[in-house]
Amino acid sequence: MTSASPPSASMPARGSGELRGSIATRKGAPLARRFFVFLGPGYLVATGYMDPGNWATALAAGSRYGCALLFAAVLSSLMAIVLQALSARLGLASGLDLAQACRARFSKPAAITLWLVAEAAIAATDLAEIIGTAIGLQLLFGMPLAVGIAVTLLDTFVVLAFERAGFRKIELFVVSLLGLIAFSFTAQLAMAHVDLGQVARGLVPTRQLLDDPRMLYLGLGIVGATVMPHNLFLHSSIVLTRAVGASQAEKREAISFALIDSAIALFFALLVNGAILVLAASVFYTSGHTEVTELAEAHRLIAPLLGAPLASKLFAIALIACGLNSTVTATLSGQIVMEGFVRLRMTPTRRRLFTRLIAVVPAVALTLISGEAATGGLLIASQVVLSFTLPFAMVPLIWFTASRRVMGELIAPRHTTVLAAIIAAVIVALNAKLIFDALAG
């Protein structure tokens, strides 16, 4: 028997609304089967935690300090699990995604402001993913960077094709690419002969962090750039693709399943980010190449250092897969934000192209005018924008999930709210330092 909750009275009909409740849940089915239905959204969210910006940070940390900053990657993942859990809880408990909740609870000028900030964050996210994918295409096929950036427009139509086939197909596409990424790094790590003792020591914080300003800076970068604003909007919406019953018991079970799903997926993201750092430590740090910060440089060095040409190809393939996955979720987030905040309706094709062109046009223009070296500056600028916009998504999320008026009986536990507030304060402080340092050069 399929059960579905009625739409909230304050919930607008929207382009992605036809996906709401489109994946049936079976009331009375065995527990494992009910849980399986809820697997998926967490993996779409997890792709945002292993984007090209994360790659660059992990490569720099691993090549400079070996595995010493591995604990920072673990800490950042734990922070992400808490905040994404709140995002899923908001959607399932209130029937509203984060963008819709902001529009329903805030004044129109405030909602418009938050919408513009969210659009800036999504454009910055998309920019980083597009550049990362284009770099991967250049490394693997020798494609000029400007051409590779333009080619990334094609994944817009990939998303449309999968969406027409059903949201579950999008999830399967993303999970398939995640499997390719996992295979690529597993193979590279096998070639690298990782020192497991070094990995174990990296899970424990080191005093060197307080004595070495550069190490502290990289550690802050790993933790501070953890949560992406678009992921908070995305997760609160895509959990609503499950047809959850209207009863409190059914909603509580759905929330529990969604939390487990996101925790498993974010643990997978941690393994990928950790693999990048460990690979850099095993290949670059141990060979004395301690200043590897560019993706292209890592690609150039990895094959001769491992003595295996296949390693560099696997590196490029994984980068393209990460970029494709991240652009898919950024495009979905653009749709959710646009319709949730301002009810702006477009055909699916126009909506996708609009979101993508916001990022593609400046990337292609700057690459053609200033050359490929300018892409590094674009990546840095995109991370500064994300750092600035993060509080505008994170603070409303924590406030909504702590409000009984919004959440009813499914309000977040007080200890979770307190923990999330502490995490938000830490991340905002770290991002403020990163912005200051970026502006100060």
Image (cartoon, grey):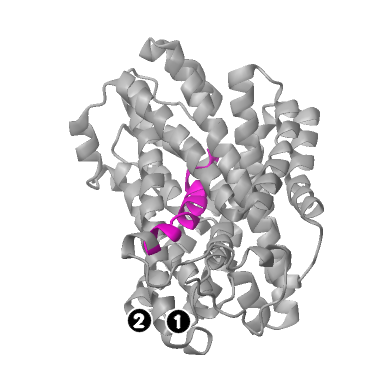
User: Separation of disc 1 and disc 2 at Cα?
Assistant: 8 Å
Disc 1 marks which amino acid?
A: Ala
Q: Answer with the quarter of the image where residue 376 lies.
A: top right
Q: x and y percent of residue 211 in the render?
A: 29, 44
Q: Which mark is residue 280?
A: none
Q: Which of these two is toward me, 411 or 390?
A: 411
Q: Return the residue at label 2.
A: 414
- The residue drawn where x is 59% and y is 71% is 97
Residue 44 magenta = yes
Label 2 element class: helix
Residue 432 magenta = no
Q: Answer with the quarter of the image where residue 249 lies.
A: bottom left
Left or right of 349? Residue 258 is left
Q: Quadrant of the C terminus?
A: top right
Q: Which of these two is toward me, 320 or 156?
A: 156
Disc 2 marks which amino acid?
A: Arg
Q: Which of these two is toward me, 193 or 344?
A: 344
Vertical side of 212 occupied by 20: above or below: below
- Label count reads 2
- Bin the neighbour count of mark 2 within 10 Å (Cα to Cα): few under 14, some 14-19, many 20 and up: few
- Bin the neighbour count of mark 1 within 10 Å (Cα to Cα): few under 14, some 14-19, many 20 and up: many
Label 1 element class: loop
Please report the bounds of the magenta region as a residue range: 34-52
- The residue drawn where x is 33% and y is 28% is 281
Q: x and y percent of residue 288 in the render?
A: 35, 19
Q: Return the residue at label 1.
A: 402
* Mark 1 or 2, nearer chain start: 1
Left or right of 83? Residue 53 is right
